[in-house]
Image (cartoon, grey):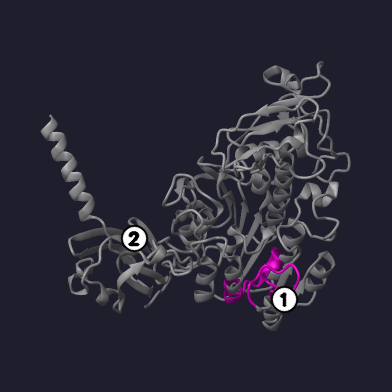
Amino acid sequence: MRKLLLALASATILSGAANAATVYPLDRATVLAGSPFDFKVEFDAVVKPETVKVTVNGQDYAAVFGKAAEFVAEEKGEKDKVLGSALILRGVRIAKPGQYRIEVAAGGETRAVNWEVYGTSATPKAKNIIFLLGDGLSVAHRTGARIMSKGMSEGKANGRLNMDDVPPVAFIGTSSTSSIATDSANTMSAYMTGHKSAVNALGVYADRTPASLDDPKVETIAEALRRTTKKSVGIVTTAEVEDATPAAVVAHTRKRGDKAEIVEMLHTVKPDVLLGGGSAYFLPKSVPGSKRKDDKDYIALFKDAGYAVATDKAELQAAAGTNTGKILGLFHPANLDVTLDREFLKKGTVDKYPNQPGLVEMAKVALDQLSKNPEGFFLMIEGASIDKMSHPLDWDRALVDTIEFDKAVGLARAFAAKNPDTLIVVTGDHTHGAAIIGTVDDDKPGEEMREKVGTYAAAGFPNYEDKDGDGYPDRVDVSRRLFLAANNGPDHYETYRPKLDGPFVPAIQNEKKQYVANEAYKTVPGAVFVAGNIPRDEDSGVHAVDDVVLQAVGPGSEGLRGYMEQSDVYRVLVDVFALGAKVTN
């Protein structure tokens, strides 16, 4: 037995060495016919160019790809450490759909990967696509938003959300190429390119070099639309427009934090409508508050490209009436204030930026503008702060933002009712480990807030009210309210109350640079210390690996069914628009 185990171990080591080369796109990649992508081979050792052999379905790769690759004798990493040799070929296109096997050999290293190149329908199935993304949207967010907004009595919801009537059709796998856990960059990038990638990556395969802008690129949906159609492109978000989710529509970088560079990529692709926050990365470094390190003024550059520019609600409405066809709206240097603060509590930075539009206002302007194009449009609408408030375990703000996102879903449904040639997709990019446990009832006896938590029959029903009929609860600090809990987080104090003074800050750094419970909440009557269960270098709750729910209605929605990877969703989107029809090299 010992000899057998040693033999197996030896075989495993040899097998690993024989398959040391890495090929991008990775094994099982799916590639839209005619879509440009970068091809790269990374060897673990320095090899001689004459030993390199690459074939595609048995033929020399240069004959299939139409050109030879650049050979890099010594690819270097941090501190000029030699990582090995590499082969790089930019802008490869494969026109013919089919199965492709790529085999690589050099200096004793071998690797084989399989790609599927796919075509699409010959004719479009829909004129427009509205892709609504609730960042971090989980089942608990939907349930909580429904109860907060519509109420519940005698075991039944007293009303329905707009998204409740969009059929749930698929479970979506969110994992990255490097980990089962994921972030907003690679998840949204998979939706928007059809290729999975590593955490923090957008529109690229994450290679081994330290530079973030040289990784192998894949085409984004906005680029595919610009290449093959005359459709308009719109991006609407409550985050910075260069944040991970909106950036995924256009960007190519290994590092989602390359926000100044992402602005340049936005300017290159030029979405017809671009609305959100993030003006700090558009302004030259000489302007106070700028986060750029150069003198480029991208607001001026967008104006020069024919864009009407808006910085508040009034200017947005004025820009909507200019009929330029192009609008750049930047309503905050960073992310927009969340709905609860912006519309009701007037907290956060609302005193500095009092006229920020909400998601629905921005989405309406975008739909009105984009629908003027007789060729149709692709519009991505992101409710960003569902995620941004779930990280710090601020569930009231997360749920109110979910209600706002749902109102944007309602706007899209109303548009599609008048324009039935529109596909609506509603989904999340990843989930959070959140669940509704029951209620917190202030009227229960005792001073300990923990004893006021109602579970099972003791939970009853929350007493939120919406007397003005705007779809939002008149107050979040009602006497019997939802109790949400996370299955992960840092050390913190649970107060069992909404944070009316501003977003929750559960943990702060100590002198050891570890995140510990924020004692600002320790003195709140009845607060309970909750021990964290994630590493001490993390300050907030983290994403869950759970599948997300995808809902869809309209022409082409029948392609979205069952379990799908996020990269599979892209294949349906481009098929709906017939972006792979009649492709030639």
440 relative position to 117: left or right: right
Position of 404 relative to 333 (above/below): above
Position of 244 relative to 528 (above/below): below
Please identify, in this view, whether the residue under mark 1 or under mark 2 is nearer the observer.
1
| Mark 1 burial class by Cα count in 10 Å: few <14, some 14-19, many 20+ | some
Kind of residue at badge 1: Ser
Kind of residue at badge 2: Glu
| Disc on res. 286 | 1
Give percent across and percent down for residue 109: 21, 60
Q: Gap in Å between the C-alphas at discs 1 and 2?
A: 49 Å
564 relative position to 101: left or right: right
As rendered, which of 191 and 521 lies closer to the eye?
Answer: 521
As rendered, which of 427 and 503 lies closer to the eye?
Answer: 503
Is the residue under label 2 in contact with that under label 1 (CB below 8 Å)?
no
What residue does disc 2 label? 116
Look at the image and give the residue range highlighted in magenta.
265-294
Is disc 1 placed on a helix, strand or loop? loop
Q: Do we see residue 557 in this rendering?
A: yes
Give percent across and percent down for residue 342: 81, 52
Position of 574 relative to 462 (above/below): below
